[in-house]
């Protein structure tokens, strides 16, 4: 069963995830604040340099399964699942900069206020354990006015892709880790079937 997916962040992880999910038959909307990345994907070109990506992006666009936008609200309203795939660069102190994760969580929360159907939010960015509970869920709940487990679902799906073999790593992973404390795990299992 194909899902409608929004992927926040069109960097390395997000672009590969978007192209590969579209390749296996899902409808995907990539979301990024950088209009150049959005334009590249919309014109059928990969925003990253990676083996196989140009072909997958072109294929996804031709099949009308892969699109991109800067409009976070429209992307959430038009999808069943949102993946947070934004960068978490290291700070001088060595800690991860989670500001992009928090910003995107808040953007998704704004859209959830308007959404009439159930939605699942999956964190895929590289973060430390506990980030979903300490940052993502509070940001989503505070902005949306809704409650996780009741009004929307949240899960975690870390990525294990390597530069140079990211497409193959995504399509034939050595393992897939899914984490959730509610029924969104069923949806994730179906997505990766």
Image (cartoon, rainbow, N blue to C red):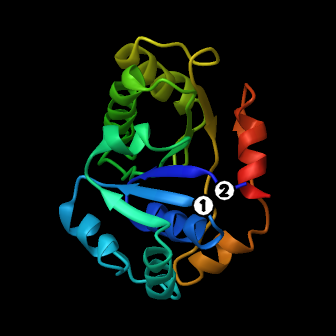
Query: Where is residue 101 shown, x and y percent of the image?
Result: 39, 40
Query: For numbered disc 2, what is the local secondary structure?
Result: loop
Quarter of the image holding residue 108? top left
Q: Quadrant of the C terminus?
A: bottom right
| Residue that badge 1 annotates | 26
Q: Dot 2 surroundings within 10 Å: few (below 14), some, or many (20 or more)?
A: few
Q: Residue at x 58, y 74 (%)?
A: 162
| Residue that badge 2 annotates | 2
Query: For numbered disc 1, what is the local secondary structure?
Result: loop
Q: Dot 1 surroundings within 10 Å: few (below 14), some, or many (20 or more)?
A: many
Q: Quadrant of the N terminus?
A: bottom right
Quarter of the image holding residue 103? top left
Q: Residue at x 46, y 70 (%)?
A: 64
Asked if residue 39 can be seen in this view, the reply is yes
- Left or right side of 159 for 180: right
How far, Cα to Cα, is label 2 from label 1?
A: 5 Å
Query: Where is residue 186 shown, x and y percent of the image?
Result: 78, 38
Query: Where is residue 158 shown, x and y percent of the image?
Result: 62, 51
Asked if residue 95 can be seen in this view, the reply is no
Q: Residue at x 19, y 62 (%)?
A: 35
Give the residue furthest to the left: 35
Q: Are marks 2 and 1 in contact (CB under 8 Å)?
A: yes
Vertical arrangement, residue 158 with respect to residue 168, above or below: above
Q: Residue at x 62, y 14 (%)?
A: 150
């Amino acid at each position: 069963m194909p899902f409608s997916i929004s992927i926040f962040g069109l960097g390395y992880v997000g672009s590969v995830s978007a192209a590969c999910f579209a390749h296996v038959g899902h409808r995907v909307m990539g979301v990024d604040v950088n209009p150049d990345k959005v334009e590249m994907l919309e014109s059928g070109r990969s925003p990253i340099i990676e083996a196989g990506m140009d072909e997958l992006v072109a294929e996804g666009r031709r099949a009308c399964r892969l699109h991109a936008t800067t409009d976070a609200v429209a992307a959430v309203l038009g999808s069943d699942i949102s993946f947070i795939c934004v960068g978490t660069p290291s700070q001088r102190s060595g800690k991860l900069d989670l500001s992009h994760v928090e910003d995107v969580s808040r953007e998704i929360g704004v859209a959830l206020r308007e959404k009439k159907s159930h939605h699942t939010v999956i964190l895929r960015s590289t973060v430390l354990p506990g980030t979903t509970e300490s940052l993502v869920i509070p940001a989503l709940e505070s902005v949306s006015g809704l409650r996780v487990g009741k009004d929307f679902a949240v899960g975690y799906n870390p990525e294990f892709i390597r530069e140079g073999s990211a497409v193959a790593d995504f399509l034939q992973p050595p393992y897939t880790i899914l984490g959730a404390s509610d029924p969104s795990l069923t949806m994730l299992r179906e997505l990766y079937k």
